[in-house]
Image (cartoon, grey):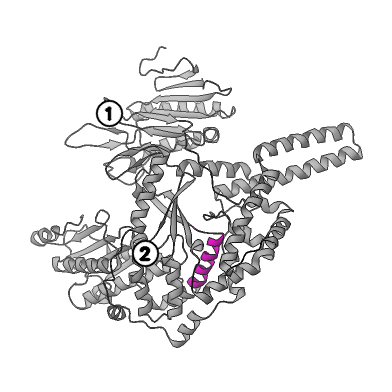
Amino acid sequence: MDITKFWVVWHPTVRVIIIAKSLQMVTCEVMFPDSDDSVVVSIVYAANEAITRKELWEELLLLSVSLSGNGKPWIMLGDFNQVLCPAEHSQATSLNVNRRMKVFRDCLFEAELCDLVFKGNTFTWWNKSATRPVAKKLDRILVNESWCSRFPSAYAVFGEPDFSDHASCGVIINPLMHREKRPFRFYNFLLQNPDFISLVGELWYSINVVGSSMFKMSKKLKALKNPIRTFSMENFSNLEKRVKEAHNLVLYRQNKTLSDPTIPNAALEMEAQRKWLILVKAEESFFCQRSRVTWMGEGDSNTSYFHRMADSRKAVNTIHIIIDDNGVKIDTQLGIKEHCIEYFSNLLGGEVGPPMLIQEDFDLLLPFRCSHDQKKELAMSFSRQDIKSAFFSFPSNKTSGPDGFPVEFFKETWSVIGTEVTDAVSEFFTSSVLLKQWNATTLVLIPKITNASKMNDFRPISCNDFGPITLYKVIARLLTNRLQCLLSQVISPFQSAFLPGRFLAENVLLATELVQGYNRQNIDPRGMLKVDLRKAFDSIRWDFIISALKAIGIPDRFVYWITQCISTPTFSVCVNGNTGGFFKSTRGLRQGNPLSPFLFVLAMEVFSSLLNSRFQAGYIHYHPKTSPLSISHLMFADDIMVFFDGGSSSLHGISEALEDFAFWSGLVLNREKTHLYLAGLDRIEASTIARYDFPI
């Protein structure tokens, strides 16, 4: 090669053909051992000067045009010497996208390239300065759509710089995943088979179970699983292959009909067409369910799109590496699963002490009381039509629970199982006892950020949507519908999240107005504490919620229904499609449960009242802009903005209120994400406030 700026080296078993080269990029066609198809690999070493990099962007676009027709997987990796957005610069001077970023972005958009899912540090370069360290993401690994389709499990790895100032980068094409036996899962394409409903009917009425309605429902659903598995294998196994074979048969029969247009040939072609359409619809339904796409209408031929979305979801959500609290990297699938199970069993199932607040104190903090009519309405039994309507109000194409039955199964087979489903749900409201199988929950980890690698980077979503577990969710939906109508009268205007008729944007606009001017020199003293509660939904105490419900006069029958719903769950953890662990929770509200947001808002109203009482008593003084309106704070679910006069005595009062609330409720301040904003203070007051150790 006549280029000495960088080298391209390969193993003898890999076949490599150089198809283009320049001072900033080398492109090769690569064929791996035991593979008949090649991929295109471009290695980049961009120039330091922006004007020279522009030549690389133009070369990249020309290459994308030349490759667009052959459909080959294309991967581009190396040092691009340019960030895509301000977040990729550790010391960004502005949050705006500048011209150089925009040019780079436009280039990648036109070339139809995107970042491959990666593990490791986001920043890949730093300036090696001990006094003014600066880090950037200058290295990246980009792929086209064909690559994502061909290698859906591939991911990039950015390692340590070692002797260089740039991080090493590599690609894992086919990661070795530990495969376990997958639990039963119902796929909606079975509902398109005309024989399926009759099969369910025959099985359902032939199963004899003795016991309560809830118990019989659980046992019957469990008994359906093996026959449904068998039916699926007999009719739809190897679905993609069978679709292709059926289509080839259609083409063959069409050719036979055109060459010899007889009645037998026409009949054979029509039959081949019918079978192919059944399989095509089943394939589309399968990938639609896996992709979780809900905005695209049914009946559209979107199989390839759903396929890409399913692959994309899998690539983003697959956990390859976890870093524990000691900084130790866990990269085996078994190790990752065991770590996740231990983490959540400690978080949700840890020991909880005795109640710390007596009921009389709750009664003082929550002055609202239910009227006689409201109590009567809350405690009223639910009709059979109420239960059916709750079932059919659930959206389609959602994740199934631990038992594998989605909502579509219940809706489509309602004529067969509807009566017994309704009896089972009604039995809960009569007995006030919930069968433990109905509240089993699978925690699925969804990354909150790109390149998630720590447990705090994942959001645990409770998947207990359907099966016997669906029946639990119907119960929760029915209770929620009654409770939310009441809470609008209980919750103060300081909270706007989750409540019908209130808009989060209103408090956002008000908060924006209140925080203006903090950068001015001549301004009255003022302060704002933005509070974040650590793992709020997972940490809240059940006895605190129950006491809050009793304080506003919720009837005992309704309180007991809710107690059964929130205090009986058991958990398993799903990691990369494999489920493990089994533990009972001792606190917390599950995200994804319809009741959880409204119960959490009620619990936060206790803190709202506590904070207001401290302001009214003079322990905390109002912000200059909020004093005329007596606005002490604004709440956005578990994020709180407290406005005060900027004084140290007021901050002390706020800190005491937060400590008392944490002692009662289990909701602890997260100091890492809590920030203090001050303006107009003299040096002495600023020095006193600094002792509280809030990030400023």
Up/down of 534 relative to 103, above or below: below
Q: Residue furthest top?
A: 2
Q: Residue furthest bottom?
A: 372
Q: CA distance from mark 2 to mark 1?
A: 43 Å
Q: Dots 2 and 1: beta carbons under 8 Å?
A: no
Ranked by sequence position, the earlier of labels 2 and 1 is 1
For disc 2, the neighbor class at 10 Å (few under 14, some 14 to 19, many from 20) is many
Magenta span covers which residues?
Answer: 463-480
Q: Which mark is residue 637?
A: 2
Residue at left offset 52%, top offset 56% = 401
Up/down of 627 relative to 303, above or below: below
Q: Secondary structure at mark 2?
A: loop
Report the side of 314 relative to 659 (left or right). Answer: right
Q: Is 343 in front, or is 276?
A: 343
Q: Is 113 in front, or is 12?
A: 12
Tell me where residue 664 appears, x and y as whole percent.
Answer: 27, 69
**Which numbered disc, 2 or 1, marks the residue closer to the eye?**
2
Question: Tag 1: residue type?
Answer: Asp
Residue at left offset 17%, top offset 34% = 130
Question: Tag 2: residue type?
Answer: Ala
Q: Is residue 247 magenta?
A: no
Q: Is 163 in front, or is 49?
A: 163
Tell me where residue 409 appears, x and y as whole percent.
Answer: 63, 58
Tell me where residue 605 appears, x and y as whole percent.
Answer: 33, 72
Q: Secondary structure at mark 1?
A: loop
Q: Is residue 349 at all visible to an observer of this figure? A: yes
| Pointer 1 residue | 165
